[in-house]
Structures are given as structure tokens and as C-alpha cells.
Image: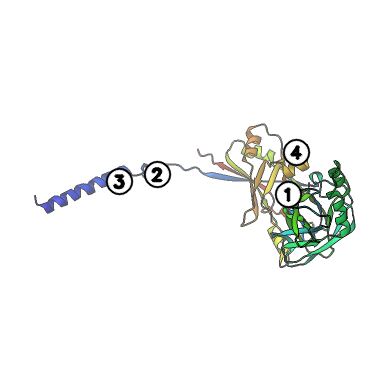
């Protein structure tokens, strides 16, 4: 046999071997695959037939964001914020700095450039007053009544992000009397007697701005009578805010939610219907669907006005003990995030449904809210059980079909 014939014969053997190997490795499911039955999903829609509005006054002291200002929201009414700030009496200083009695004191606010509620291009004016009411951030509520008296300063918020405010010499002198007090009871006297400063929004303001606790401080300027000055940052000892709301427009078939807990919604789940129609089904998922009133919310805002959107819905079993604290700071039993496409929120409640059908769950009321300790002042609007069928809250049950 010639060398050429030998090479051709060897090539044929190699190709035949590869063909046998590939045939042996072929997916067996591809042969006769049409005889394998695929599971079929069924979707049942159960309508929520009852919702009830709830209202609490949330905690508003020591938040992650400090709001200040006022805004007339076309949907949620006039929102007026009173902001409370109290500087620390003592702080750590380098050994090289000795504070003189002639120091100046100013307030510095660095605004959050990503957060504005209202007319982003407007100018806001504020007047600052000495607080007369005893208050404590840990227990402060949005509806607490705070009294204030002597004016201690004023400032304007336009487009700048760093604001420095002069304080009246009278109030600064009061602060100095506690700052240089070495008595053992100096701290307690300071807390009870010099209660801080209230930031009061002027009547025609059209936006609420935000600052973070670490971005709001008092500035002690030392050595003003010498050639060298030192600026020492004095952090906030305590801070918080209260809120007044009025004039809200109650849009038909909707309910509002506020991050300050001034509005929540109790939802009666369709348990009887669920047990009658789904107790024999192989449920793989259950979702509570709620629809945000997207058109009402978006079309109500004029140009350059902004309303912070929500990022999460919380769903709780009803809390009979400390409901305000639980709905604002507690862990939600279920939660969901809005869809970017249709503003619908899907909350996975599969565990709840399974416990109703196959366990001993007897609770059929869940509390819906957007409670937050952050101080963002977020509000939104959802359709309730009186809305049209395509917009009212509903429970979607996904199960495997019973194929015989």
C-alpha cells in the first residue's frame, strides 16, 4: 500500500472514531424529548376587598438625614418642618489649642446635593430662634409641640451647598457660660437650660433641603483678637425635627403612605377565598401586588419640582405592643421594591399563604407602610380596594397545574 493510501485510510479511521464518540455523548434527552411532560403553571388572582387607613406619629429625633424647610405639595399638602439643633458643650481638643473667651461661634450646614423635596431652583429663607421647650432626640416625635423665643440668626438657601450662619452675640455668650463651666453639674445644667436652636422656615419657601448629622456642625473660631485663628468643629449633641401637614388632597380610590408613619394601610387578606380555592393546589409562589398612582404623582409636579421616591414597601403582622417603634425601626415580615416600568410593587408572601393553608396562621390583617428612621420625608400614593379591578391590590397565586 502506498504512503498516500495509508494516510487516507488512517484519516478515515480517525473521522469514524470521532463520529462514534460524538454520537455516544449526545444528550439522551434530545431523543424522544417530546414525550417528557413539562410542568404547567396556573395563576389565580384573588382581590383584596378591604383596606383601612392608619395613622401614627413617628419618631423624628437623631435621623440619618436632617430636613429643614417647607413645601406645598400638590398631592400631600403643605409640609412644614421645624428643625432642632443643639451643639455639644464639650469636645476633644489638641493640646496645642487653648480656647479664649473671645471666640466666635457660627453654624455650618453642608447640604445633600442629591436630596431636595420641592422646587429645586427656588430660594429659601430661614430664621433661627432659641428653643424654650425641653426636648430629647431619642424620644422626639413628629407632632411634638416645640416653643421657641429669641431670634439668634437668619440665613438663605439658594443653589450653594455649603452655608455658614452668624449667631447672635447674646446667644453665643450664653453658650460660653456653659462652655467654660467646670462644675460637676455643668452638663446637666446645659442640657436643661440652653436647649438649642430652632430653624424656622419662612412662609414663602418652596423646598425642603437635607443635611447629614456629620455635615452639620457649629464652628468655634478661636483667637479672633490675635494674628492666628483656629477653627474648631463642634459636633451636634442632639438634633431632630417636627412636621406640620395640612391641606392634603384626598384623591379618590387611593391612600397615602408617609415615611414618618402619619399614614399607613391595614390590608385584610382574602383568607376565606384563599382556603376555598387554593387549599389543594401545589403553590410555588404567592405575591401581593400593589399599584402606585404613577400618573397622579408625576403629573402633579410642576417643572423643576422633585418629590423623593420610595425605595421599599414594608409589610408587617399587626404589632399590638409599641407599634410606632416596630413599624419604623423593626424588621418587616415581608417587603418589596417598586418596578421601574409600571410602579407596581410585588411583595412575596408565600410563607404567609402556606401558613394560612397548611399551618396554624390565623392572622388575616397585614400593615403596609414605608416607615423609615432616616428622615428623608418620603411620601407616595397607592390605589386601594375601591379602585378599578386592574389597579386595586390583589393576591397572585402561582401553582403547578394538576395534570391527570
Say if mark 2 contacts mark 3, CB within 8 Å: no
Neighbour tally class for label 4: few under 14, some 14-19, many 20 plus, Cα within 10 Å: few
Say if mark 4 contacts mark 2, CB within 8 Å: no
Disc 2 from disc 1: Cα separation:
82 Å
Q: Is residue 224 above or below residue 316?
A: below
Residue 162: x %, y % from top left: 73, 62
Q: Earlier in the sequence, mark 4 or mark 3?
A: 3
Q: Nearer the viewer, residue 87 or 82?
A: 87
Residue at image mark 1: 95
Task: Report the residue at 77% width, 52% height from top.
Answer: 98
Q: Earlier in the sequence, mark 1 or mark 3?
A: 3
Say if mark 4 contacts mark 3, CB within 8 Å: no
Residue reaching furthest to the top: 360
Residue at image mark 3: 22
Q: Nearer the viewer, residue 315 or 104?
A: 104
For the residue labelled by badge 1, is the local secondary structure a helix, a strand or a loop?
Answer: loop
Neighbour tally class for label 1: few under 14, some 14-19, many 20 plus, Cα within 10 Å: few
Residue at image mark 4: 319
Q: Earlier in the sequence, mark 4 or mark 2?
A: 2
Q: Residue 342's mark? A: none
Neighbour tally class for label 3: few under 14, some 14-19, many 20 plus, Cα within 10 Å: few
Residue 326: x %, y % from top left: 74, 41
Amino acid at each position: 500500500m502506498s504512503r498516500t493510501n495509508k494516510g487516507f485510510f488512517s484519516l478515515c479511521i480517525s473521522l469514524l472514531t470521532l463520529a462514534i464518540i460524538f454520537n455516544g455523548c449526545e444528550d439522551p434527552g434530545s431523543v424522544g424529548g417530546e414525550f417528557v411532560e413539562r410542568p404547567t403553571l396556573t395563576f389565580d388572582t384573588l382581590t383584596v376587598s378591604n383596606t383601612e387607613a392608619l395613622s401614627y406619629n413617628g419618631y423624628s429625633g437623631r435621623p440619618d438625614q436632617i430636613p429643614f424647610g417647607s413645601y406645598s405639595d400638590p398631592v400631600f399638602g403643605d409640609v412644614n418642618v421645624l428643625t432642632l439643633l443643639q451643639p455639644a458643650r464639650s469636645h476633644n481638643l489638641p493640646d496645642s489649642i487653648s480656647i479664649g473667651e473671645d471666640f466666635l461661634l457660627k453654624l455650618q450646614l453642608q447640604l445633600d446635593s442629591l436630596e431636595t423635596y420641592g422646587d429645586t431652583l427656588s430660594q429659601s429663607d430661614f430664621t433661627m430662634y432659641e428653643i424654650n421647650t425641653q426636648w430629647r432626640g431619642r424620644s422626639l416625635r413628629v407632632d411634638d409641640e416645640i416653643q421657641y423665643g429669641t431670634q439668634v440668626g437668619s440665613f438663605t438657601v439658594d443653589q450653594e451647598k455649603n452655608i455658614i450662619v452668624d449667631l447672635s452675640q447674646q446667644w453665643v455668650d450664653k453658650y460660653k457660660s456653659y462652655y467654660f463651666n467646670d462644675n460637676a453639674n455643668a452638663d446637666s445644667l446645659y442640657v436643661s437650660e440652653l436647649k438649642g436652636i430652632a430653624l424656622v422656615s419662612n412662609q414663602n419657601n418652596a423646598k425642603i433641603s437635607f443635611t447629614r448629622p456629620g455635615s452639620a456642625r457649629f464652628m468655634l473660631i478661636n483667637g479672633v483678637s490675635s494674628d492666628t485663628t483656629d477653627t474648631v468643629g463642634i459636633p451636634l449633641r442632639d438634633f431632630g425635627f417636627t412636621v406640620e401637614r395640612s391641606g392634603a388632597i384626598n384623591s379618590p380610590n387611593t391612600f397615602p403612605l408617609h415615611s414618618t408613619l402619619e399614614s399607613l394601610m391595614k390590608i385584610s387578606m382574602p383568607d376565606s377565598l384563599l382556603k376555598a380555592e387554593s387549599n389543594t393546589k401545589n403553590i410555588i409562589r404567592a405575591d401581593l401586588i400593589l399599584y402606585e398612582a404613577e400618573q397622579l404623582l408625576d403629573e402633579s409636579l410642576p417643572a423643576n419640582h422633585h418629590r423623593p421616591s420610595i425605595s421599599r414597601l414594608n409589610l408587617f403582622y399587626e404589632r399590638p405592643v409599641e407599634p410606632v417603634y416596630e413599624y419604623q425601626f423593626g424588621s418587616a415580615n415581608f417587603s418589596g421594591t417598586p418596578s421601574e416600568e409600571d410602579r407596581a410593587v410585588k411583595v412575596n408572601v408565600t410563607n404567609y399563604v402556606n401558613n394560612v393553608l397548611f399551618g396554624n396562621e390565623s392572622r388575616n390583617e397585614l400593615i403596609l407602610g414605608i416607615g423609615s428612621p432616616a428622615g428623608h420625608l418620603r411620601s407616595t400614593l397607592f390605589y386601594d380596594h375601591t379602585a378599578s379591578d386592574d389597579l386595586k391590590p390583589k393576591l397572585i397565586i402561582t401553582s403547578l397545574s394538576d395534570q391527570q
